[in-house]
Image (cartoon, rainbow, N blue to C red):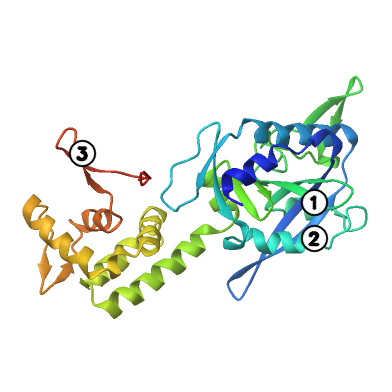
Amino acid sequence: MTSEETLKKLKTIDFKKCHISLAIVKEYKRQRQSHYNVKYVQINPKLEDRLRKILSSKVEVSNTVEDYTFDCPEPEADHVKSISYEETDFYQIFNKLLPLNPEEDVVESVDELVKAKSYLIIVRNDEKIQAIGFKTLPENWKMKKAKGFIPLMYKDNRFEDLDSNPVFSIARSIDFIYFKDVLFVLSKKLFEAGLNFRKGMIAKSEEFYDEAEKYNIFKNIDVLKEKVGNNQRYLRKIATIMNLGYYKDQRFLDKFKLVNDIKNWDIEFNDGHIVITEEKLDAILTVLQNKRLHSELTEEDFDVESVKKLTV
């Protein structure tokens, strides 16, 4: 089933006939790897209805879909990006959720809520889980007492001191929706933060360095490593280069050198190897992402942030 077909199927869910649950996700590290625990949170019918409307409204307005890539732009209002859940940490989270009982495996203390990293809006019918909305929690998930002020809530015609009654907030937005092994991403930035994509991009960069040295593509690769470091903008570029794989295609590299000479890009080659300098690093990475493009209409060249191949 294509992403387009899966999205159409998602839009056929009758949310009014489904049960809605809320669960929190806690993350912990073991040997520098992320692991997750999931527990349900008991909610009242009013909050259940609000959560239903949040998720169903996002599904309703999502009408077009494209594959997620490291360099894709943020989705627009009616647009989503799709990626297999198995390519993300949500695979772990989902497998933790599946065996849980919504009535028994529940949060037992405020401390558990405070330590949560994200929450799940879970849609199920009498048979199984149908869909899940995921939201990364903000820093102010638990309302904190401002310095010099006592937090109060007006309820039943009186003020109540919130120090003894912690207040938590639910967002009106969600980061992505899980349905039939596909994640439909509504916020690229929060999706990546919630599922630790920086860690994955760092791993990609290390793999890229190893392959670049194996194929002897660059001179001064240490300049590249130092500049990229833990910088997410550069890590995203490296991940894109790695996925495209042009750097392993000798014909592409030969054409790179030829066009560089014709267009006077001033990128240096030494005995067939690309010479990396701080001044030309961004240009080199742009070309290796195949994002230095020529317009046949205006005869101008452009460096672009995102590309989409035309299909005819």
Residue at 92% x, 53% y is 103
Mark linked to residue 238: none
Crowd tier of the residue under label 3, counting other residues whose Cα lies within 10 Å: few below 14, some 14–19, many 20 or above: few
Q: Position of residue 22 (x, y in %)?
A: 80, 46
- Which numbered disc, 2 or 1, marks the residue closer to the eye? 1
Crowd tier of the residue under label 1, counting other residues whose Cα lies within 10 Å: few below 14, some 14–19, many 20 or above: some
Q: Position of residue 151 (x, y in %)?
A: 76, 33
Tell me the SS state at disc 2. Answer: loop
Q: Is residue 95 left or right of residue 192?
A: right
Outermost residue toward the bottom in this view: 214
Contact check, label 3 and label 1, Cβ < 8 Å: no
Q: Relative to 37, is 43 above or below?
A: above
Q: Position of residue 242 (x, y in %)?
A: 37, 64
Mark linked to residue 98: 2
Tell me the SS state at disc 1. Answer: strand
Residue at 75% x, 31% y is 53
Toward which corner of the image does residue 54 lie, by quadrant?
Answer: top right
Tell me the SS state at disc 3. Answer: loop
Mark linked to residue 295: 3
